[in-house]
Image (spheres, helix red, strand yellow):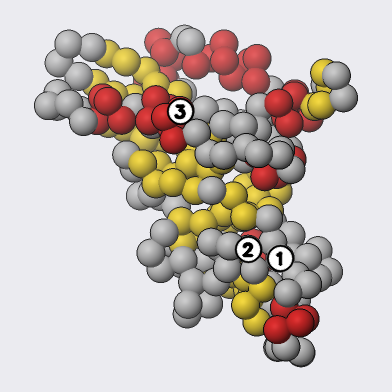
Amino acid sequence: FFLRILNMKLLNMQRTARVVVVLLLSLKCVHGLSLAQRWSETWWPVGFTETLNNKSPQAITLLGAPVVVWYDKSEWRASLDRCPHRFARLSEGRITSHGAIECPYHGWSFSGTTGECLKIPQDNTQEQKACARITTLPTRERNGMVFVWTAPLYDIKDSEPNEEALKRIAMDELFATDVTVVGTDYSRDLPMDATMLAENVLDPSHLPFT
């Protein structure tokens, strides 16, 4: 999970950006849809820009799905962590000189913007490349964090990224004020479910000792 503690002149606010991995979501279904699917139409933080590795792809889990995050020389990108060729994990591959992500198995490379296949070393014809595409996820960098819109993971139709929701989640209004903000960013993998995590997050008195 990601925790950001903001200390301001008039307000002491503990801010938990969001829980990135929620095991319970993949276990229950409502009207044929898992809760992970129902929760996918929103923005989820995947890391702090100061601590994310911008030199190589990184594997994370979002709503029970494998996701790869990488920096394409100008912006952060994210996609389903699976090459459409042989389902190899793209997170074990590399970033090309042009910012594309390259599969470690056969070297196929893909655009983080459109998902289209850019190169197939074994048969680089346009016809072959048109048959392969990765599932890309809209990604935004905001106030020192990287956020991902996860609806494409579950093929949610007609789901456009909600930019207004991102403004609220990323606390744009707060960061746009003249209030002096001193922040502490912290991330950690925790082997627990969402309910136990929520209980601990609501108890800030233990932070100095944990």
Tell me, for residue 165, which label it has, or none: 3
Whether residue 2 is visible here, answered yes or no, is: no
* Disc 2 to disc 3, C-alpha distance: 24 Å
Where residue 140 sits in the image (x, y, percent)?
A: 44, 46
> Which residue is farthest right?
32
User: What amino acid does circle 1 point to?
Assistant: Arg
* Disc 1 to disc 2, C-alpha distance: 5 Å
Name the secondary structure under disc 2: loop
Q: Quadrant of residue 89?
A: bottom right
User: What amino acid does circle 3 point to?
Assistant: Ala
Where residue 123 sits in the image (x, y, percent)?
A: 76, 89
Tell me, for residue 133, which label it has, or none: 1
Residue linked to disc 2: 115
Name the secondary structure under disc 1: loop
In this rendering, is residue 181 above or below 47?
A: above
Where residue 102 sits in the image (x, y, percent)?
A: 63, 73
